[in-house]
Amino acid sequence: MDDARLNEELIDCLFAIRTQVHGELKDLAREAGLTDTQTDVLWRLSRAEEMTARRLSDLLQCDASTATSMIDRLEKRGLVRRVPHPSDRRAKVIQLTPEGCALRDRVIEHTTQHSPFARLDRESRLRLHALLREVSDGARPAGEPTPGKNNHDKEQQQ
């Protein structure tokens, strides 16, 4: 198999995995009365110590108004709250409420239990994790922080 075909098949595999994970999450989201994107927000909020609406819109690849309206809906459901940013008076940090944490825990538990990676032994998952991190970190523009790390310094600059 030549390199172009190999790359094409790797991308096909990624799309197939995404479809499988998305399908599992869709069922849980429907059961919880959430949209797919709202479920994605819960997942992403669980991965970051601090998250502003701007950072969330960047991660979701949507405009700020879309992220804001999504946060508004989650706030009305009692799943998130806005609190003052610890070092930037102009910004608010989006935090999960206890109810949001409980639902997030259900999302994480459900997703990990139905993970397509569960078919691999631990050693294989660790190797795959290292490879995927290498690829995803390499695709990030220079200076872009790694998702899930405390990124409030970068957010302050924005």
Image (cartoon, rainbow, N blue to C red):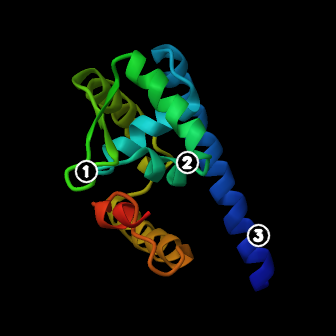
State if disc 2 and disc 1 touch (CB < 8 Å).
no
Q: CA distance from mark 3 to mark 1?
A: 36 Å
Q: Nearer the viewer, mark 3 or mark 2?
A: 2
Q: Which numbered mark, 3 or 1, is in the foreground of this view?
A: 1
Screen quadrant of the N terminus: bottom right
Disc 3/disc 2 C-alpha distance (Å): 25 Å
Give above or below for 153 relative to 107: below
Residue that mark 3 sits on: 8
> Which of disc 2 and disc 3 is earlier in sequence?
3
Residue, disc 2: 60
Point out residue 121 in the picture as x, y percentages from the top left corner: 37, 58
Which quadrant of the rendered structure holds the C terminus?
bottom left
Position in image of residue 122 (x %, y %) = 33, 60
Q: Nearer the viewer, residue 140 or 117?
A: 140
Look at the numbered discs 3 and 2 and tell me whether their residues touch, using CB distance below 8 Å. Answer: no
x, y percent for residue 58: 53, 54
Residue type at mark 3? Glu
Q: Nearer the viewer, residue 104 or 119?
A: 104
Residue in front for this viewpoint, 46 or 115? 46
Residue in the picture at 79% in, 80% down? 4
How far is mark 1 from mark 2, CA to CA? 17 Å
Residue 118 visible: yes
Q: Secondary structure at mark 2?
A: helix
Q: Amino acid at mark 1?
A: Glu
Residue 134 percent across, percent down from the top left: 46, 77
The image quadrant of residue 103 is: top left
Relative to 138, residue 28 above or below: above
- Badge count: 3
The disc label shown at residue 49, or none = 1
